[in-house]
Image (cartoon, grey):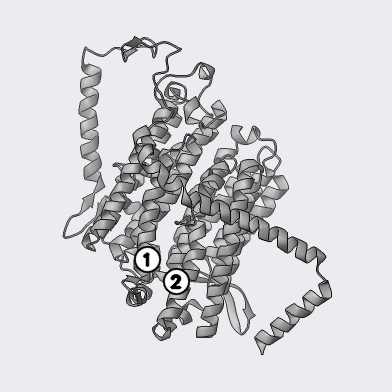
């Protein structure tokens, strides 16, 4: 059987399977096996791409079909892999603690199926079909338990429907200008398209796809929706879902010859590529500093997800082999450490019942494995060696330097600074300082939860020390786009003007750690004290004096940056939500009270006029 057909059928089978057995205790294990089978098929596609599905149909004399290329395959590997790890996490104690896991399993399986359909799009209409499926599947996974997530998902729905209309308008415009819905026909027709048409297409598609990515100014819905998604599914959706917008944007606009036309069509001093790259830079910076203000661990990570998406697009929009490699590698790296961080936060919530950073502290003595996972995750998120996030950020910085974009390099560096500040707050407030009395009796999560987290942390470390493993996957996507892959080896990148060997960097790092460990353990000056047998600020610490004061963690910084986003941007979004609610009520009344035959007659006349 055609392997792409088999992959889609397996994904459909997974949906049916988890619906059938979703309420049973072993449902998570069977779901994990089903995703493992999908991953095995994807690995089998390694040297067989591009591969077309045998399923297709015709619309307006256009063949609508599906085809898996190296770019879609790269994102598909991450999608199915994240679902596999998340299912393992929910298979044991965590899943047993939930009232009904069927809807969570089904929503996950539906999301994977929708994403695979999108990632194997062969033309603009199949892309739109996949896009709509992904949008509604995301809505399902966010609203499965109602509550705050459902409220946030309603805001997402307003954005998503507007974005879908923008994308559909762009597709109609392409069909009217090109006469075909094939990607290749659109790319071949680019030299004949006027500057106004090209700008219109860029604005329509970019705004539509930017909503899923959370690019500014379409970002305000995402953090609340992803943070409030129930349990481990939040790890999947935060690590993967927003990348579907990036995939679609890359597919349409970021082939080398398409980029050349985006640069060549200028409006005043600005071209389309510059517009996208500066939006990406602002998205990398501003949400990162918004994360500093959060007192909820899930919200803090969700805001970072928005910022990291901007950094990915920034690398890809540089449109050089190194920039594209850095951007795509950051997609891989982020998916790994963000999933690990969300699972670690979910473990903390499972044991303590809260993710409020003002109500935690000192958990390192009770949950040491979860602490290790979070430590490795925040090192990757901050872009520090030896975890994998360092390598992709290094490539993006170097690409900005070689492309002579110093202001964008400054923006990327400021983004990293904000990330370091906020992730220190995250691990400090949860694991360091004094243990609260109400948490004296808690213990580490069981192996069914700790092993998936440790697997992700291990992958983040291994691909940081040996980035050549991940770069081999990136090569598939890069070649499919039309960029030459970078020359790399197991330890990193070989370049004539400055190479990176993470094997050497990691060796030096552990050499320094080893020297410190020898001094610490062999010295005669160390002794262990209880957390309350301590002294700080002129007082002996006791149970009523909390050493890890966590509220208002960066007050000086917040006084400076707080007014930037508490004013006009939030008010604008609230006004849009209110407008949508008013319009929805008006349309609802119109449909219920209007004279239906007259309404149908008007629609019919307008449709005939359009056809004529």
Residue occupying the point 31% across, 53% down: 468
Instruction: Report if the CB atoms under discs 1 and 2 are less than 8 Å apart.
Output: yes
Q: On the image, numbered disc 1 is attached to which residue? A: 275
28 relative position to 388: left or right: right
Question: From the image, which quarter does the N terminus lie in?
Answer: bottom right
- Can you say whether 332 is above or below 171 in the image? above
Task: Depth check: give the residue in front, 78 or 404.
Answer: 404
Q: Quadrant of residue 475?
A: bottom left
First along the sequence among labels 1 and 2: 2
* Along the line of sight, the residue nearer the viewer: 280 or 516: 280
Most extreme residue toward the left is 497
Please indicate, yes or no, whether residue 470 appears anywhere in the rendered image: yes
Viewed as shown, does residue 604 lie left or right of 420? right
Name the residue that disc number 2 marks.
202
Tell me: residue 83, above or below residue 159: above
Which of the pair 95/150 is nearer the observer? 150
Residue at horizontal 51%, vertical 58%? 211
Residue ID at (63%, 83%): 60
Viewer-side residue, 304 vs 268: 268
Secondary element type, mark 2: helix
> Residue reaching furthest bottom?
612
Query: Which of the numbered marks, if any, corresponds to residue 386?
Result: none
Quadrant housing the C terminus: bottom right
* Residue 43, visible in the rendered structure: no
Regarding mark 1 in the picture, which secondary structure is present there? helix
């Amino acid at each position: 059987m055609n392997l792409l057909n088999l992959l889609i059928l397996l994904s459909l089978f997974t949906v049916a399977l988890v619906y059938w057995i979703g309420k049973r205790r072993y449902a998570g294990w069977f779901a994990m096996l089903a995703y493992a089978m999908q991953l095995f098929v994807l690995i089998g596609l390694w040297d067989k791409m591009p591969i077309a599905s045998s399923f297709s149909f015709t619309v307006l004399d256009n063949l609508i079909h599906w085809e898996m290329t190296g770019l879609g395959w790269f994102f598909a590997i991450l999608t199915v892999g994240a679902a596999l790890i998340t299912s393992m996490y929910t298979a044991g104690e965590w899943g047993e603690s939930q009232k009904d896991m069927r809807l969570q399993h089904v929503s996950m399986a539906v999301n994977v199926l929708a994403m695979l359909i999108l990632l194997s799009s062969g033309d603009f209409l199949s892309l739109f079909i996949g896009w709509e499926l992904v949008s509604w599947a995301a809505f399902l996974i966010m609203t499965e338990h109602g509550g705050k997530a459902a409220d946030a998902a309603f805001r997402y729905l307003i954005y998503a429907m507007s974005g879908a209309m923008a994308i559909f308008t762009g597709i109609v415009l392409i069909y009217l200008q090109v006469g075909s819905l094939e990607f290749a026909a659109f790319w071949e027709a680019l030299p004949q398209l006027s500057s106004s048409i090209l700008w219109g297409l860029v604005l329509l598609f970019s705004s539509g796809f930017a909503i899923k990515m959370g690019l500014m100014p379409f970002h305000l819905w995402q953090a609340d929706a992803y943070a409030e998604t129930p349990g481990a599914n939040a790890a999947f959706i935060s690590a993967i879902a927003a990348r579907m917008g990036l995939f679609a944007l890359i597919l349409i606009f970021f082939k080398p010859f398409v980029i050349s036309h985006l640069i060549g069509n200028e409006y005043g001093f600005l071209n389309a590529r510059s517009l996208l790259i500066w939006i990406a830079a602002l998205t990398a910076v501003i949400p990162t500093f918004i994360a500093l203000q959060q007192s909820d661990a899930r919200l803090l990570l969700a805001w970072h997800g928005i910022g990291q998406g901007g950094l990915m697009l920034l690398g890809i929009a540089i449109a050089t082999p190194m920039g594209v490699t850095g951007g795509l590698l950051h997609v891989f790296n982020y998916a790994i450490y963000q999933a690990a961080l969300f699972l670690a936060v979910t473990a903390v919530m499972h044991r303590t019942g809260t993710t409020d950073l003002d109500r935690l502290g000192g958990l390192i003595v009770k949950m040491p494995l979860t602490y290790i996972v979070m430590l490795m995750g925040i090192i990757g998120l901050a872009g520090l060696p030896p975890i994998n996030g360092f390598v992709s950020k290094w490539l993006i910085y170097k690409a900005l330097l070689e492309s002579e974009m110093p202001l964008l390099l400054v923006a990327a560096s400021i983004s990293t600074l904000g990330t370091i500040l906020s992730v220190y707050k995250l691990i400090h407030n949860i694991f360091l300082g004094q243990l609260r009395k109400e948490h004296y009796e808690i213990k580490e999560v069981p192996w069914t939860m700790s092993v998936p987290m440790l697997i992700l942390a291990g992958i983040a470390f291994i691909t940081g020390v040996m980035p050549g493993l991940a770069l081999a996957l990136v090569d598939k996507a890069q070649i499919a786009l039309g960029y030459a892959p970078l020359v790399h080896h197991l330890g990193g990148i070989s370049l004539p003007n400055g190479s990176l060997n993470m094997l050497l960097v990691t060796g030096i790092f552990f050499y320094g750690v080893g020297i410190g460990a020898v001094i610490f353990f062999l010295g005669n000056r160390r002794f262990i004290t209880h957390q309350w047998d301590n002294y700080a600020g002129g007082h002996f610490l006791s149970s009523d004096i909390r050493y890890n004061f966590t509220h208002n963690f960066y007050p000086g910084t917040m006084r400076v940056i707080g007014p930037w986003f508490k004013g006009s941007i939030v008010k604008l979004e609230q006004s849009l939500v209110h407008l949508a609610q008013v319009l929805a009520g008006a349309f609802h009344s119109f449909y219920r009270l209007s004279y239906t035959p007259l309404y149908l007659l008007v629609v019919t006349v307008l449709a005939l006029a359009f056809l004529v």
